[in-house]
Image: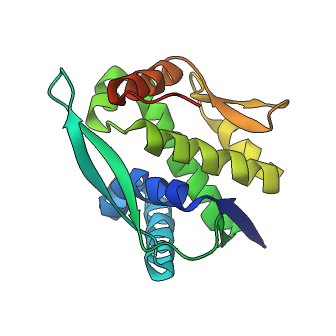
Amino acid sequence: MDVAISLPIRTWAALDVALGFFRAAPGKLAGGRITRHCQRLHILLRRSGIRSRYALVGTADSGKSLLRLHVQGPPQREPWILNLPAGAAQSLAEACLTVIGVQSDPQLGALLEYEAEELQAARALLSEVRRQFPELGRVVRRVRGPKSVRWDERCQEYMFMPPVAQRVHWHYLRVGAGVN
């Protein structure tokens, strides 16, 4: 059974960037299944015409580059719907949980320093998958230790838990953008 995931083009592009670690990691390091599904997603997005790059917009006081995502050549329709097999959707959800969860660990967070847009894209994928395929909620419940996201019944989406929410807020403040 396929899961039809509908996300804006810019969100798909940011998600593609966020999953870059899994695409680049050797199979044994990242887990062959997750890496394979991330690579499959990358290929589907490239074939559809979704290409993106980060452009330098300035430098923060800390010396870190301030980047903004630019999407090049997206498909004509917005939002873009991608049909993923349930197994691939589950793998991508697991990868998104890792991308978000790593932000609550100071040492690992420095290793995988994601921008707010990438973290928001990972959260958006988790939310969309859960809305369309509720059985995947088990993926989040399986995570041991402190949770990096929680399901909000009223809004029907995942919300960041502290300290991940704080890091996302700092990212937005650093680039001078609103959190909306």
Q: Position of residue 20 (x, y in %)?
A: 36, 57
Q: Position of residue 176 (x, y in %)?
A: 38, 27
Q: Nearer the viewer, residue 27 or 169?
A: 169
Residue that appears at 34% across and 53% down? 21
Residue that appears at 84% across and 31% down? 153
Q: Is residue 133 visible?
A: no
Residue that appears at 69% across and 62% down? 6
Q: Position of residue 113 (x, y in %)?
A: 32, 36
In the rendered image of this protein, does residue 103 appear above or below residue 53? above
Q: Nearer the viewer, residue 128 or 97?
A: 128
In the rendered image of this protein, does residue 52 appear above or below residue 98? below
Residue sitting at the far right: 154
The quarter in which the N terminus is drawn is bottom right
In the rendered image of this protein, does residue 110 appear above or below residue 157? above
Residue sitting at the far bottom: 47
Q: Position of residue 60 (x, y in %)?
A: 21, 26
Q: Nearer the viewer, residue 27 or 77?
A: 77
Residue that appears at 65% across and 30% down? 159
Answer with the quarter of the image where residue 160 lies: top right
Horizontally, residue 153 falls left or right of residue 178, namely right
Check the image and tell me how it is coloured.
rainbow
Answer with the quarter of the image where residue 91 lies: bottom right
How many marks the image carries: the answer is 0
Q: Nearer the viewer, residue 19 or 8?
A: 8
Q: Is residue 108 visible?
A: yes
The quarter in which the C terminus is drawn is top right
Residue sitting at the far left: 63
